[in-house]
Amino acid sequence: MAVHTALYQPDSLVLLLSPGIRQSGELFKKCTAIYQSVGRPVAADSETALTVTLANRSRIVSLPGKDANVRGFSGVRLAIIDEAAWVMDPLYYAIRPMLAVSGGRLILMSTPFGKRGFFHHEWVQGGSGWRRFRVTAEQCPRISAEFLANERARMPAAAFDQEYGCEFGELEGAVFSYEQIQAALADDVEPLWA
């Protein structure tokens, strides 16, 4: 989607974000490999280890997962957050305003990391503005049933369910479950102080 947007929507700014710069760089390498595999149909004006600028004025920029390091971008056509469950909430909230004027798209890709953070919130309570796709390891033809059986035998059930089954598990060490906390909340209680 990043490469397609940059190629077919001139003057697009595409941001690739991950928890760390190494992961963002890996995602960027995948994008440049796709760009090269389709024959580089729009010439590149400049290429660095983390940015490509095309002759149609589109850019794909890879950034680390720190909100202080991503500020200053505007008019973002597409923002992709990889391993979104591992990205801290402030980064997510720093990215959202960048899409306001452009009407850009936001894609969150991740396996779960417990019932916490913006990724879990958007998955569970994000409303109809999101399209959600859940693909488990069993649905992936590149992963064999034998491999998954081996992994299931060697991993704690909660870890396996999270990594391979896309299940949001309880946070390790939590005293109360997510459901117990949600059941204790109420919107109809008037505050004690105005």
Image (tube, rainbow, N blue to C red):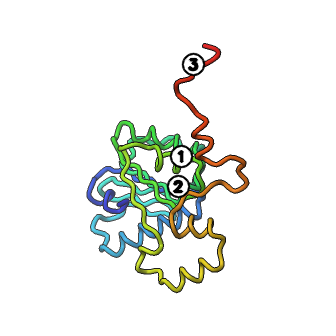
How packed is label 1: few (under 14 Cα within 10 Å), some, or many (20 or more)? many
Q: Nearer the viewer, mark 2 or mark 1?
A: 1
Q: Secondary structure at mark 1?
A: helix
Percent across and percent down for residue 19 are 59, 56
Q: Secondary structure at mark 2?
A: helix
Quarter of the image for the N terminus: give it: bottom left
Nearer to the camera, 160 or 113: 160
Q: Secondary structure at mark 3?
A: loop
Nearer to the camera, 139 or 28: 139
Distance between the alpha carbons at the discs numbered 2 and 3? 35 Å
Quadrant position of residue 150: bottom right
In this figure, what is the number of numbered marks?
3
Residue type, label 1: Phe
Percent across and percent down for residue 65 are 58, 52
For disc 3, the marked residue is 190
Pointer 2 with pointer 1, Cβ within 8 A? yes
Comes first in the chain, label 2 or label 3: 2
The residue that appears at 60% across and 13% down in the rendered structure is 194
Left or right: 56, with 64 as reference point: left
The residue that appears at 38% across and 42% down in the rendered structure is 75
How packed is label 2: few (under 14 Cα within 10 Å), some, or many (20 or more)? many
For disc 2, the marked residue is 84
Percent across and percent down for residue 7 are 29, 60
Residue type, label 2: Ala
